[in-house]
Structure formats: C-alpha cells, structure tokens
Amino acid sequence: MISTFPRVQRWSYYQGFWYFPMFLEGLMSAQDHFIPQSTDIFITSCPKTGTTWLKALTFAICTRSFLSGSSASSLLTKMPHDCVPLLEYDFAQNPIKRDRAVPLVSTHVPYSSLPKSVVSSCCKMIYICRDAKDAFVSLWHFIADLQRSKNIEPLSLEEAFELFCSGISSYGPYWDHVLGYWRASLEFPEKILFLTYEEMKKDTASHVKKLAEFMGCSFTLEEEEEGEVQKIISLCSFENLSNLAVSKNGKHRADDSSFAMKNSVFFRKGEIGDWANNLTAEMGARLDDIMEQKLKGSGLKL
Ligand code: A3P
C-alpha cells in the first residue's frame, strides 16, 4: 500500500506528513493494533529536537526509586533509545519485548496521526521541540552520516534545505508537527507538557523538577536536599552520556541490518545555534520567515 503513496526521495506521504517507509509501516500497524497501558507516558518529538536527552531524563526520573545503594542506572550501559521504546519501530517489530515496569513510550508520530487508542486514553505526553534551523542542521548531519555509513550518497545540505523549507523531511512539515502538539497542549494542558530544547538548556534544574511533577513522581524535599535533581542532570548531560563506552562503541538496532546505527550518531554537539556554522545567514533568515508565518497567531514563538 505504501508504495502507492506520493513519494519524494525516500519519504512517503501519509495523512499530511512525510515518512521513511519502514517507520510508516510501523505507524500504520500501531494505528491499527497498539493499546497503551493506562500509566504510559509518551515522549513525543520531531526527530533531532532533543529526544535522546528527554528520554534519558524521564527514564532517570521515573526509575530513581528502583535504584538504591550501589545500583547503577541502566543509562550507564544502555542508550536512552534502548531504555525507552519507539512506538513506530519497536512495537511494530516485537511488542512483547517491552519492559512493563517502565511506563515510557516514545514516538515521532505527529499528534494528528497518533493511534486513536493513545489520543482517547488518559496517558500523558511530553513534547520537545527546538529552533527549526538547529533541528534541520542536526537532521541533515544525522541522515547524511547514516547514508554514508551505508555507502549511499547523501543529499547535499542545499537540496535537503530546499525540501525542508517545502515541508519535506522526516515526520515533516516541521511546523505542522510542532503546531499539532502545541495546540493539543493548549487544549489539554494537564495531559500534554510542551517543552523546548532551548528552555531546558537554559534552566535544566527547574525543568527536571517540572518533568517529575508532571509525571506524578515529584522530588521529595529530602531528595532535593540530597542533590537528586543535580545527580539526574549530570547523569543525563551531553558530556556524560556521549562519553560512555556504550555511546562511543555501541550500536542501536544492532540486529537489524538495514537500520543498525552507531550510538555515537545521536551525540553530535548538543549546542544551541550551531546552525550558523552550517547555513548561510540568508538560509537562516528564510527558515525564520517560514516559521514565523506558519506559527503566526498560534501564540508560539520558536
Ligand atoms: P545536534 O545535532 O545539534 O548536536 P534527538 O535526540 O532528538 O535525535 O536530537 C539530537 C540532538 O540532541 C543532537 O543535536 C544531539 O547532539 C543532542 N543531544 C543528544 N544528547 C543530548 C544530551 N544529553 N543533552 C543535550 N543535547 C543532546
């Protein structure tokens, strides 16, 4: 069926968004079959907007009570992506592999295409997004690295930028992805927490506390006094995670030859504003204009 959908480069068009076919296959399967646990919390994002970091933080927050004394967090030996399964990949492949004690599921699926079972449930969602220029640059490097590792000639930065500006990118149009979750967060603020990478970077501590509160596992005064918030921030920091042996030497989806990738591709720079080292000022201004127009009237400024 997917081969009959409109296609540009490797992306197929479905319900207003663009997907690599294998994620689309997983999404369509999830739309038909996925049933969440009532306690599930969905970590939602467009790719390359801070998902790895948000997965690490939410995983560390909600598993902290399992850790006592010398037990170390799984995050020291497993990638955040292997701690929090991806709806449109892991569930489509092997739903029973899930660790039911961890109530976290991630997805890049746009709000309007989420399985009805998720939208109509009482499950909470946390969405992260990021300046479109940084998201684009991060995405371009990520896909280009993956393609080079498989001897596929990547799109040039300029070609990919043209497509991105016309809405064609993984799970794009980027602005529609952001707006879908933004509007839903305004309608259901108790259910959807909307975050930006930039705000989280600026004040990580207050966001970690906010995340814990939203997830229903606030830090106790005692935990705060014992520096639990800071411990989680340090554990999940770019510096710490990117320097772990599992991040430097490990592979994600190692048993899937077409989608295996080095864990290190998930850690590039972790900075705000790196777009300026990759795009010209004109390209930056053009994408800013597009975002401004698309977000106009929404109350959101990115
Ligand atoms: P850059 O490519 O700009 O460096 P995602 O996790 O959604 O794939 O997003 C990837 C971006 O998040 C990359 O940005 C990556 O470097 C950055 N990142 C990964 N881990 C991070 C962490 N622990 N803290 C902050 N940023 C992180």
Image (spheres, helix red, strand yellow):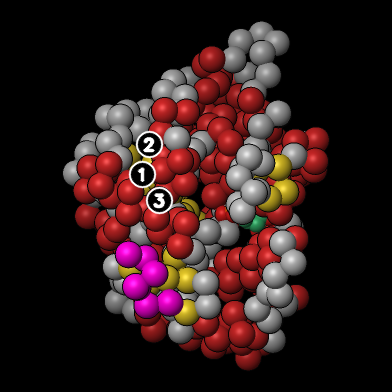
Instruction: Check if mark 1's residue and mark 2's residue have beta carbons within 8 Å.
Output: yes
Q: Which mark is residue 125?
A: 1
- Between the C-alphas of marks 3 and 2, the distance is 19 Å
Residue shown at 53%/62% (left/top)?
A: 130
Q: Which mark is residue 49?
A: none
Q: What is the secondary structure assignment of the residue under circle 1?
A: strand
- Is residue 2 covered in magenta? yes
Neighbor class of circle 2 (other Cα within 10 Å; few <14, some 14-19, many 20+) is: many
Q: Which mark is residue 26?
A: 3
Instruction: Check if mark 3's residue and mark 1's residue have beta carbons within 8 Å.
Output: no
- Between the C-alphas of marks 1 and 2, the distance is 6 Å
- Is residue 108 covered in magenta? no
Instruction: Check if mark 3's residue and mark 2's residue have beta carbons within 8 Å.
Output: no
Q: Earlier in the sequence, mark 3 or mark 1?
A: 3
Quadrant containing ligand 1: bottom right
Amino acid type indicated by mark 1 = Met
From the top left corner, tell me how far across and down residue 102 is, in percent: 45, 26
Q: Which mark is residue 41?
A: 2
Residue shown at 63%/91% (left/top)?
A: 282
- Foreground residue, 164 or 269? 164
- Foreground residue, 299 or 108? 108
From the top left corner, tell me how far across and down residue 60 is, in percent: 57, 29
- Foreground residue, 190 or 36? 36
Q: Is residue 149 above or below residue 51?
A: below
Q: Quadrant of residue 74?
A: top right
The answer to whether residue 30 is visible is yes
The number of callouts visible is 3
- Between the C-alphas of marks 3 and 1, the distance is 20 Å
Question: In the rendered structure, which segment of residues is drawn in magenta?
Answer: 1-7
Image quadrant for the N terminus?
bottom left
From the top left corner, tell me how far across and down residue 174 is, in percent: 45, 70
